Amino acid sequence: MSQTTGFIGLGKLGLPIAEKLIEGGFSLRVYNRTTQKAASLVARGATAVKTPSEAATGGQAITIVSDDRALLEVASEEFCEALGTGLHISMSTVSPVTSRTLAERHARFGGRFVAAPVFGRPEAAAAKKLWICMSGAVAAKEAAKPVFDAIGQGVYDFGEEVGAANVVKLAGNFLLTAAIEAMAEASAMAEKNGVPRADLLNMLSSTIFNCPIYVNYGKGIINSQFEPAGFAIPLILKDMHLVQKTASDARAPMPMVNLLIDRYLTMLAKGRDQYDAVGLVLGAAEDAGLQW
Amino acid sequence: MSQTTGFIGLGKLGLPIAEKLIEGGFSLRVYNRTTQKAASLVARGATAVKTPSEAATGGQAITIVSDDRALLEVASEEFCEALGTGLHISMSTVSPVTSRTLAERHARFGGRFVAAPVFGRPEAAAAKKLWICMSGAVAAKEAAKPVFDAIGQGVYDFGEEVGAANVVKLAGNFLLTAAIEAMAEASAMAEKNGVPRADLLNMLSSTIFNCPIYVNYGKGIINSQFEPAGFAIPLILKDMHLVQKTASDARAPMPMVNLLIDRYLTMLAKGRDQYDAVGLVLGAAEDAGLQW
Amino acid sequence: MSQTTGFIGLGKLGLPIAEKLIEGGFSLRVYNRTTQKAASLVARGATAVKTPSEAATGGQAITIVSDDRALLEVASEEFCEALGTGLHISMSTVSPVTSRTLAERHARFGGRFVAAPVFGRPEAAAAKKLWICMSGAVAAKEAAKPVFDAIGQGVYDFGEEVGAANVVKLAGNFLLTAAIEAMAEASAMAEKNGVPRADLLNMLSSTIFNCPIYVNYGKGIINSQFEPAGFAIPLILKDMHLVQKTASDARAPMPMVNLLIDRYLTMLAKGRDQYDAVGLVLGAAEDAGLQW
Amino acid sequence: MSQTTGFIGLGKLGLPIAEKLIEGGFSLRVYNRTTQKAASLVARGATAVKTPSEAATGGQAITIVSDDRALLEVASEEFCEALGTGLHISMSTVSPVTSRTLAERHARFGGRFVAAPVFGRPEAAAAKKLWICMSGAVAAKEAAKPVFDAIGQGVYDFGEEVGAANVVKLAGNFLLTAAIEAMAEASAMAEKNGVPRADLLNMLSSTIFNCPIYVNYGKGIINSQFEPAGFAIPLILKDMHLVQKTASDARAPMPMVNLLIDRYLTMLAKGRDQYDAVGLVLGAAEDAGLQW
């Protein structure tokens, strides 16, 4: 791999992904707004650069930033020009509209764009267990394959419409948040009827709900593990607002997402900005007069 | 096993459970309101009786009927007297209040009562793959063990408060219905943004949601498999009403269960009484203008 | 008026209604579970009796009790027999089903039954400003007219189906509770954007919402006047449950009533049983982090 | 009045307001995107101009356009410069943020800005019966008084924070929409229990809900008067989205507004874009299997 790969965004997910890439033999040019976050990568051979555009000069760039606005700023005209006919692999959780905007922006410089949001919390990224959703032009997805192989345990292809993978990522984040709320309501009902939520959730997540979301978030609920956040409330709220807007623009009502947003707004109104997404459960608990 | 076991309720779940018991060497006295349903069991050695009380005379009885009212009628004073100091294993999905009522009723005759609702659709029962939740006195649960071994793949003990297993069963049915609604809303959002629900649900149920509920109901959603019903809408609606009441009596609001009930009411208002529980998804789809 | 009229139920509304009847020249035989409540009426010429049935012997009886169960107990077979071919005017807020049950029970003794729930808080009753909804047989409603004239400012006739007036009363209580919630949400949004709820509600209830519900409950919201209760939370919650059940039995989803019930459950879960119905507003306020 | 007043926006509300101003002696310079809408005003003495900025040259301008984007485009830097130290009276239903943005934009040119959204449908405007909410600097509001006197029946002052009147307007539109939904749910419940919605709504809007919103929208519901729209669904939906965003940004959950938005999304998903806001009621009706 003679090519260097730009890597922009060293947040909770970005950092372990970058590590996997270094381990996979990629030569990285890393950029982060807060520069000290790059130190550990530089110690392992990465080059720190001062702008996203500098990171893009090697012909391939990966971005994983916090929201649509940040992504649109990072992937500026200048960035697209620097990347030229190269490949931009966009891993942020953003709206499909933003992917379409960026695909067009790159196209003006001959560049290719793949939307490739991932599922998995920071621990999963560190264990190379991310699941990747991709959409975009066939050749672009093909070119992105080595990156995906280095960081995840599987890739799902959602076709050539570049926003499709973003839609799936948003849908998945909605589904997991809905599962947390459902577990919370069920647990509140159970506890107020004398059944500890640990008994309830351990049973269900061992049987008909024995999958990572119920197992992992179930543990978080049982242990009231709200801090430190792997995925903080303002971030999940941003995602739920993206879901709401993506649905609303398409004229698809989603009553559950409204409920989830309201729960998170209440968490923020009560000053719990630093809680993890699983802190959602305090809504149902407190409405029932429970202290978790 | 010299003792005979009464078996009352040969519905969609009851029948395959009774078959497993016969296969497991139990000698059954079977009762069902609609008598012809007993024919296949009689052919395999069971004895058909004419009243629930007759079924109870052997000292052990299993009931699995459609709702609280039916159970309270079946397990009448007369029935309790007939059972005497025997054991009543109650597998219906009913309210915890009904279990408490029946435990007291049996106690007056020296009888024992175990609440033992099960998770699993008819296919799971036929494959001996039910999950059993139990609650009640320790000795009673111990006595019920051979029955559980013959029909399920695992038993979870929720302690001595006899209604606890019912609470768990209601919570589980709520969780699965909530999962269906969440998949429906996500699918409607996805399809109105150009992503087929099959692509979305196949990916998610292979990865972070790879558990029976998402896999099996996901298939039902993808294939619009609403009939014939394994678990018909009036039955799941009855369960959701039990959840709502159990929560409300304990002063625990459950906004999601309200939404689920409203969806099912609309299904019934549109004449879809014979649809399976998964038919719930038509609510989100039709509100978004989709035909599934 | 040689006939005496039984009057059963001296609660917050019953007492001022009974006073209006005495002022209107009615000769009352009053019954209340808590007997001391009859004292002020006895001082004004009423006769206190020891059972509902005794109250009914004069050929006309008015009941206004707290719920369906209380009404069905008061208007027992014995009561119906005592009333004989007389007239029962039922003013309680109960389900239409209960009215149908009672109409049939009276019919077996040749008696007549009018459902006549009223709109108005205790102050309105004291000012002879109740609004009365009636349903039942034409002759029965005609016979009840002098009673209505003595206590209210207007009567609305909902036909001969005896439960119709109950449906209207439930619908009205739902509408007023929904209005309180809407004012609460609007007020929370306004205050968190710097506009005092007094400014908002005073303006709206002086203009496009200048009607008693918005004016009166608006004042309660502005002044955080939650105690003492004119209409306590457990009573309004009972009504909302009746609305929910009446709608659900008819397969009509009412998402707003679900929300209202959840709000009240949370009030109870937080120990606010003694608050007035307007205390509902604390739900929206506290979810937004406001202290009202 | 030697000064001429620019008037921008001749929509359903704008046109009758402009007429009242002409009747009140104002000399108008009118601008509308669709120029033929100005014809009737020109016939009565108004001058049609070709850009918003031309309309602003007389030192006073009134804008009443469809949304935030349109208002921000109309009140461009060029417009603000043309208005100079004059007064901009902004009557559109927009977010408080937009008012703050425009107040600052005008301030850079020494201009004054008053937010003055109005309550009332086109008929009310034609009858000079609008209610006006105003906020902004004291002197600016004072200067706007002759305009308000010419078009409305009353003005409410919400202080100097320029977005306050917008918050009140949004809250009011939310309240009225919530009232429509509540009437719809109550009516569906009533009709499925045999009580015609006309009987229910006529009674309630004559008594405890005898105010314009319930009276007027009640009639619309009774008569299924969905077209032609006085206030079309896409417009009310835009307002509800503004309410949702204004609340969400302030961390105030509003579950009712979510429900209203979902209802309107379904109306649009079913192709009813041209229906009036009252068409909202079809959601509750159709969910209950009713055809209104």
Image (cartoon, coloured by chain):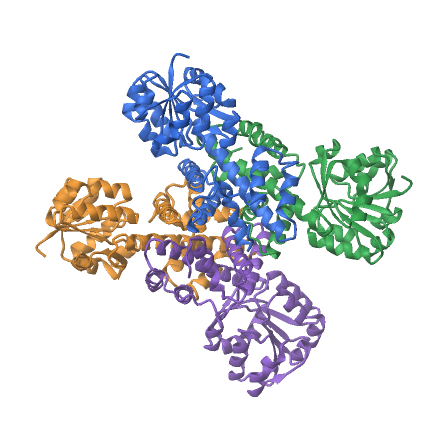
Chain colours: A blue, B green, C purple, D orange
Residues D197 and C273: in front is C273
- In the displayed structure image, the side of residue D286 where residue D85 appears, left or right: left
Q: Kindly identify the residue that appears in the image at 39 percent across and 64 percent down.
A: C222
Whole-percent x and y of residue B216? Answer: 62, 31
Residues D125 and A115: in front is A115
| Residue extending farthest front | A43
- Whether residue D38 is visible, yes or no, is yes
- Whether residue C45 is visible, yes or no, is no
A179 up-or-down from B69: above or below:
above
| Residue extending farthest left | D2
Residues A198 and A20: in front is A20
- In the displayed structure image, the side of residue C240 where residue A240 appears, left or right: left
A113 up-or-down from A263: above or below:
above
Quadrant assignment, res B119: top right
Whole-percent x and y of residue A187? Answer: 60, 47
Whole-percent x and y of residue D183? Answer: 46, 55
Quadrant where the N terminus of chain A lies?
top left
